[in-house]
Amino acid sequence: MHPALKVESLSKGYDKQIVISDVTFSLQEGEIGCLLGPSGSGKTTLLRTIAGFEQVLSGEIWVENSKVVSRGFSLPPEKRQIGMLFQDYSLFPHLTVFENVGFGLRSMKNPQKKGHIFDLLVTVGLEEEARKYPHELSGGQQQRVALARALAPRPRLLLLDEPFSNLDVTLRERLSMEVRDIIKEQHTTALMVTHNQQEAFAIADRIGVISEGQLQQWDSAHVIYHIPANGFVAAFVGEGALLPGTVVDSRRVECGLGILEGSFTSPCPTGCSVDILIRPEDIIHEDDSPLKAMVTHKTFRGPNILYALCLPNGDSVLALVPSHHRHNVGQKIGIRPQVEDIVVYTRGEVCAGIPDIHEGHEFQVHC
């Protein structure tokens, strides 16, 4: 069975600068993938290369069982049967919603065309707005029109370039789930680009984390969050802290939280010096615990407060605590570690691999 999308050893550059380096991944039919990375990481260039808007240096791209790119060969974009949802929607202002959705269906016979357009408008919940023009719609409605238009020709693959970036936070969260449901209902294979990890988690079956043109990890959201392949992924995805530690034996490691016991994500010999990834949810607030940590910073998040805590040995961790437990900076609170999968890296590996990735999220690391 051929993957719906296969990218193999793909590289792309401008002049002497490499933008995408030896990228390989695949999507099965009906899966939604997401390219996640900071600004300038190469994710949009990769998407445009798959669409056919950019030429490659080397590698191959397959859509279903058709090769669309190889060295010296590139199928024109209009022949790839790929749909594209752009960041600005690109709706035609002089056409109605109905006409916008049907714009790419010139070869379809009229009665069949009208029925197909109406079915799509029902799918995206806009059948009552069919006669309206784009300027009469909200931002969320415009996005759904653009999605319906991209799906209308029944593309073999749908590409989405930062589709929610122009929407406010509340609408973005709701629409991300709606868009996922619509794509799944249409049994369409899709690949999205975003720098927002919450969007990636909400929509994608498979996530590819990209840094400086290299694919760092391609896996499910659960694996990427809980078992990051390297220090960059650990720091970029989610929040957390790195604690220096020493491996005691095959299931135990000693650090500022005491002895942690569990399964190591990668083998480390006894006595090995490591950095241990600790997520905020790994730290349980427990007043009676003998282990005390001092609050050094707090961020109110409605139902929770994110506390930065200083351990007795001077190391720092983060803890996510229900907000009805209110503690002041400088106060000591009881905590208990609850770690099952112990994510470890060779000491110094993370610091060597982290560029400036902190786009508004918390990660405690001392390099």
Image: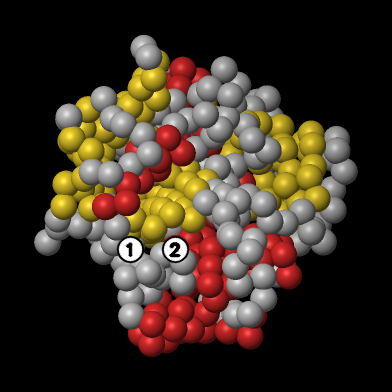
What residue did someone put label 2 on? 150
Name the residue: 72% across, 47% down.
Answer: 306
Say whether marks 2 and 1 touch (CB < 8 Å).
yes
Q: In which quarter of the image is residue 211?
A: top left
Crowding at dot 1, Cα within 10 Å, few <14 / some 14-19 / many 20+, comes out as some
Q: Between marks 2 and 1, how big is the CA–CA gap?
A: 8 Å
* 11 sits to left or right of 295: left
The kind of residue on which mark 1 rests is Pro
Query: Dividing the image into 4 quarters, which one contains the N terminus?
Result: bottom left
Secondary structure state at the residue bearing disc 2? helix
Number of numbered markers: 2
The spot of residue 48 in percent (x, y) is 40, 40
Name the residue: 60% across, 80% down.
Answer: 130
Q: Does residue 227 appear in the picture of this structure?
A: no
What residue did someone put label 1 on? 155
Task: Say which of 169 and 165 sits in front.
Answer: 165
Task: Say which of 269 and 358 sits in front.
Answer: 358
Query: Which callout, 2 or 1, points at the residue further toward the start of the chain?
Result: 2
Farthest residue to the top: give it: 16
Q: Looking at the image, is 339 positioned above or below residue 213?
A: below
Query: Dividing the image into 4 quarters, which one contains the C terminus?
Result: top right
Crowding at dot 2, Cα within 10 Å, few <14 / some 14-19 / many 20+, comes out as many
Task: Say which of 297 and 358 sits in front.
Answer: 358
Name the residue: 36% across, 34% down.
Answer: 54
The spot of residue 168 in percent (x, y) is 72, 56
Q: Looking at the image, is 104 positioned above or below residue 208?
A: below
The kind of residue on which mark 2 rests is Ala
Q: Does residue 190 appear in the picture of this structure?
A: yes
Task: Say which of 186 and 361 sits in front.
Answer: 186
Farthest residue to the left: give it: 1
